């Protein structure tokens, strides 16, 4: 029992020494880190309103930038400086855009994102409150997610971004089902009009064989046709119709 206690004491002392050594090493590098961070920030106009302070190898960024993406880029750049142990990003965006105006700007951009590259198979949601944009929904690949986030992060007025986007599982079976359902729906004469305007496609979300239809259609008949056409495609486990009728809520 005594040996065990001594062993634990030795381990505790080693851990404390290691921690103190790390802190001292981090502290001894602070000035060099500080100089490199200051030089990096001053090298680009978009970071001229940003300052850095360093303690025990951890850099704290404060100040203002015009775009949210500038804040992210500054933190990434500083994080790559040699000997940096971490970055606290306290940078704020100094522009103000009314939430409703900001929502409309982002929504319009997202509506045309990835046109011709699978936009029909993505369904994004958006909320804006006090300049913070929350993006959610389902997309069929990581490229679509990253593209959507890039749009939001570079939109003037956005102060922060919350990423709630779900990237659906990679599946050859689901991909085949997506294409066959899209052909069934858009191949129906009355439904071709929804393929003309990129902002109006019927969104086809497929998750492990389960199909959900999203979007806005002109009338109840179009909603029923879309659902019926989706159900004619073999291989799906379920089809859920969440299409909204224009001017009628849901």
Image (tube, rainbow, N blue to C red):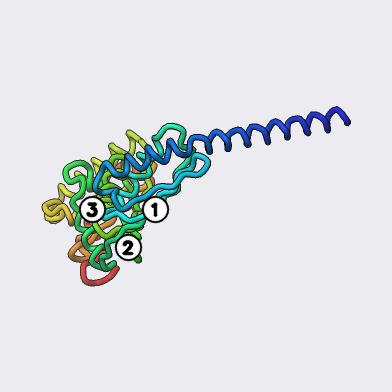
Viewer-nearest residue: 166 or 73 = 73
The residue indicated by pointer 2 is 131
**Residue 22 at what x, y percent from top left?**
58, 34
Circle 1 packing at 10 Å, graded few (<14), some (14-19), many (20+), is some
Circle 3 packing at 10 Å, graded few (<14), some (14-19), many (20+), is many
58 up-or-down from 13: above or below: below
Image side of residue 111 versus residue 173, left or right: left
Q: Residue at x 20, y 60 (%)?
A: 222
Q: Earlier in the sequence, mark 3 or mark 2?
A: 3
The residue indicated by pointer 3 is 110
Q: Residue at x 38, y 45 (%)?
A: 237
Which image quadrant: the C terminus? Answer: bottom left
**Residue 181 at what x, y percent from top left?**
25, 45
Residue 62, labelled with which disc? 1
Give the SS element for disc 2.
Answer: loop
Viewer-nearest residue: 49 or 116 = 49
Viewer-nearest residue: 43 or 2 = 43
Residue 164 in sight here: no
Q: Residue at x 49, y 39 (%)?
A: 57
**Residue 114 at what x, y percent from top left?**
20, 45
Q: Nearer the viewer, mark 2 or mark 1?
A: 1
Viewer-nearest residue: 142 or 152 = 152
Instruction: Give the alpha-carbon distance from disc 2 to disc 1, as whole Å.
Output: 19 Å
Q: Earlier in the sequence, mark 2 or mark 1?
A: 1
Q: Farthest residue to the right: give it.
A: 1
Residue 208 in sight here: yes
Instruction: Give the alpha-carbon distance from disc 3 to disc 1, as whole Å.
Output: 30 Å
Image side of residue 209 versus residue 215, left or right: right
Give the SS element for disc 1.
Answer: strand
């Amino acid at each position: 029992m005594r040996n065990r206690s001594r062993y634990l004491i030795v381990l505790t002392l080693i851990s404390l020494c290691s921690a103190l050594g790390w802190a001292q090493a981090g502290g001894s590098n602070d000035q060099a880190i500080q100089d490199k961070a200051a030089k990096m920030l001053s090298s680009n106009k978009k970071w001229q309103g940003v300052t850095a302070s360093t303690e025990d190898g951890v850099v704290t960024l404060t100040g203002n930038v015009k775009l949210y993406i500038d804040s992210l880029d500054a933190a990434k750049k500083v994080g790559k400086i040699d000997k940096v142990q971490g970055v606290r990003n306290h940078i704020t965006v100094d522009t103000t855009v009314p939430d409703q105006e900001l929502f409309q700007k982002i929504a319009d951009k997202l509506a045309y994102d990835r046109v011709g590259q699978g936009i029909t198979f993505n369904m994004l949601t958006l909320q804006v409150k006090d300049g913070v944009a929350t993006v959610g929904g389902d997309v069929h690949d990581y490229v679509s997610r990253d593209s959507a986030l890039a749009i939001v992060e570079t939109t003037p007025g956005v102060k922060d971004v919350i990423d709630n986007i779900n990237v659906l599982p990679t599946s050859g079976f689901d991909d085949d089902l997506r294409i066959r359902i899209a052909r069934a729906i858009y191949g129906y004469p009355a439904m071709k009009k929804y393929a003309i305007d990129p902002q109006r496609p019927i969104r086809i979300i497929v998750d492990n064989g389960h199909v959900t239809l999203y979007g806005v259609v002109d009338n109840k008949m179009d909603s029923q046709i879309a659902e019926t056409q989706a159900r004619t495609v073999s291989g799906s486990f379920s089809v859920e119709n969440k299409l909204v009728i224009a001017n009628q809520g849901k």
